[in-house]
Image (tube, helix red, strand yellow):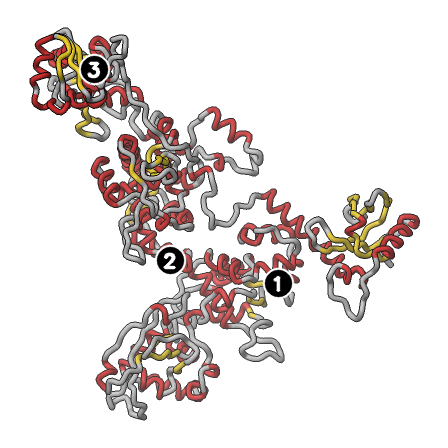
Amino acid sequence: MANTLADHLRSRSDAELGDLLRLRPDLVVPAPTDIATLAARAQSRVSAARALDDLDEFTLRILDAARLCREPSAGAGSADTADATVGLDAVLAMATAPGSGATAAQVRAAVDRLLARCLLYGSAGRFRVAGGVDEASSPYPAGLGRPAADLGDRVARRCADPAALRRTLLSAPPSARAVLDRLAAGPPLGTVTTAAGGPAAGAQAREASAATAPAAAAPAATAPAAAAPAALGPGDGVSPVRWLVEAGLLAVVTDEPATAGSQAVELPREVGLLLRRDTGPLGALRPDPPAAGSAERDPKAVDSTGAGQAMELVRLAGALLEALAAEPAPLLRTGGIGVRELRRLARVGGVSESLAGLLIEIGYAAGLLGAAELPTSASRTAVDQQILPTGNYDQWINEPVARRWERLAGAWLAMTRRAGLIGRRDDRDRPITALSTDVERAGAPTVRRTVLGVLAALPPGAAPTADEVLTLLAWQAPRRSRGRDELHREVLDEAAQLGVTGLGVLTGYGRSLLAGEGRDARDIAADDDPLGVRATEREHRGAASTVERALDDLLPSPVDHVLVQADLTVVVPGPPEPALAAELELVAEPESTGAASVHRVTPASVRRALDAGYQAAELHELFARRSRTPVPQGLTYLIDDSARTHGGLRAGSAGGYLRSDDEALLATVLADRRLAALSLRRLAPTVLVSVVPAGRMLEALRQAGYAPVPEDGTGAALRTGRPRARRAPVRHPVTLRSVDPLAAPKLTAPRISGLVEQLRRGEAAARAVRRAPGPVRAATGQAVDGLAAVQAHSQALAVLQQAVRDKALVWVGYVDAHGAAASRLVRPVSIGAGYLRAEDERTETLHTFALQRVTAAVVHD
């Protein structure tokens, strides 16, 4: 068996090395130069912790069994585990003890998973625990304490006699036995109070704080201890912990952190194993994941429910973005959107504040929202920033509903933001606002994919509860899931709000989104299209993605018609086409939304359409063309009456003036007290002037119920059309950048093959360095035995010139372009123009060395 991990890796085949890199891709960042570098990186604490984070609960327990079964080599102390070996038979005996619930086949499969990741290395029957595992794991394997010999003489003497130890346990009072059972379940540490309180203090039990327990374990039970030491029996009112310490069943430890007025106690390993005699040394094991999804849902109903929610999300997002376009939200100096602004946007968009914050974060991540700077009047250098839609919003609003949803859902899946924190208080008791830095969480994409991955692994239609999902997550990755229950519930709630899930089940198009089958170029595997040619072509064609097609099949088809009722309501029997939606926005007021929306034509909406440039005849033609029902006479009269009075007044700039052929109308305006602030005066029977600019005059007249239109200097009426909306600078959506900054790189088969080949070449070069003569190794910074003077540069050149004449093999020491010292066995071909050209016979490659970088040259024996 290999003594070191580097020797073990050297003995692996190329396929086995490739499997290791695939399972632990963090080992190739940056690419290792040789096997020794790969082994050192695999045994680092950070890499070992990342590998442990991916293991399930059962595999971690088997690793704990291997750590407990280590046998130090001859001459090593009991505490020395650096060279300790583990026998598979010992692990099998511990893990398959009666009551554990595991079989030998399951244990062997877990050992194979650990061997494949090099957390264990060696042969199948005897192996070693890799370095870094102990450092990255809990100091208490399987929740068991240290051996009694390491905890003091009292507990060592008690545990040395197994029969006496069992008798002592049987004589323990119920309160003391309860403390033992709690500590035996793990972790074996607890804290006890040391304040004086007499015998009554023993009844005041409390739980230990999480800070007193190991970081990788759950909180331990605690109980107070009496201040005055006395050898009292269990029936004399002494506290349970005090009795256990005096009996040698607990050890007071001084090397563990404890709060003021408290002490740490530890349960010896021998006592813990005795208390676990019914479940085995490792406790009750769960080789298989817990059952989930007992409730069944019809997949068609799931997809229909999710599609309905997806369509509603797109509508709400559009309404919120439109509200920001109409009135941008100022950005706080400290960053983020203020609480009052968020409340206003939620009210305008008809959503809750939490959903408004989520939509803002998603819109920003999708590149639909951005910050625009406005110079302030207070300072030439100071700027005010506002959040408003970007130029991408104008394109997004005209896309199909399915494509709009895909962009929002993809941004949610990839954004490094936790919207659930919006509205809470930070450490300084300040509210956490939307788009602030306090919401940034680099691991958020991994958490979302992990939670949705649990749902995707279940059979179609299986509907797990939130608690069942959390239980599955705790089994699949207990280290990564610890303390994240609240975050996992947030992901489930957000997925339901976005329509990724329906009725608690992952939808079909949600599975495609999670699998990366969206419009992003990443959905084409690098193996099939390494240059991204087909991805670029598809983006230019605008072809629908798998997600878009699946969702589009579930959504009702967009409609291009309406149903006009006699009460001037306009019913849209489905999602309107973009052109129809733009027309309805001008000519009608929305009353209800949903699969079939309802609008109402009012005098104000007709006047708005006339202000935008429509003529009365064009409005009649619009309703006749779009309506599948006869246009009611009331609507025709409303349009004609509004058009008859529209433009009866003309506004221009003189400060501002009004003119009209209707002298009676001008007299009415002049006598209207609501317009006193305009300071109107008559210039002629058909002309009024004011000091107020024409724009303010138009606004005041319209608020008073009149219908003026502006005109230019020639007297021609101006058709303003829809005002040009201000937009923030275009931003790229987050889905076009790195999905998860914390995730390891995804390695393709060609990439893995190249890395393995690079490792083999680096290993060959390292062996060549070790075989190089002493002067060459000394010149390249290698340690050599005895004194080895560095060769002079002139001597090295002489050796090379002679080797060219003799065509002999030469060891060449040199410094590469990166400043690293290296050596190579080559056959010189020529020397000239300051360069040595030599052939490496092993690789049949011609190399060129700058003579100024050559440090040594020795003829090969």
Q: Which residue is mark 2?
A: 474
Residue count near mark 3 (Cα–Cα under 10 Å), binned few <14, some 14–19, many ≥20:
many
Along the line of sight, the residue nearer the viewer: 307 or 717 = 717
Q: Quadrant of residue 333?
A: top left
Q: Which labelled disc corresponds to residue 651?
A: 3
Along the polypeptide, which appears first: circle 3 or circle 1? 1
- How far apart are the two marked residues, 3 and 1, measured between alpha carbons? 88 Å
How many marks on residues?
Answer: 3
Q: Is residue 297 visible?
A: no
Q: Which residue is mark 1?
A: 5
- Element on which disc 3 rests: strand
Badge 3 amino acid: Ala
- How far apart are the two marked residues, 3 and 2, measured between alpha carbons? 71 Å
Figure check: 452 above or below 179? above
Along the polypeptide, which appears first: circle 2 or circle 1? 1
Q: Is residue 702 left or right of residue 26?
A: left
Badge 1 amino acid: Leu
- How far apart are the two marked residues, 2 and 1, measured between alpha carbons? 31 Å
Along the polypeptide, which appears first: circle 3 or circle 2? 2
The extreme top residue here reads 661
Q: Position of residue 757 (x, y in %)?
A: 67, 48
Q: Is residue 357 visible?
A: yes
Q: Position of residue 94 (x, y in %)?
A: 47, 71
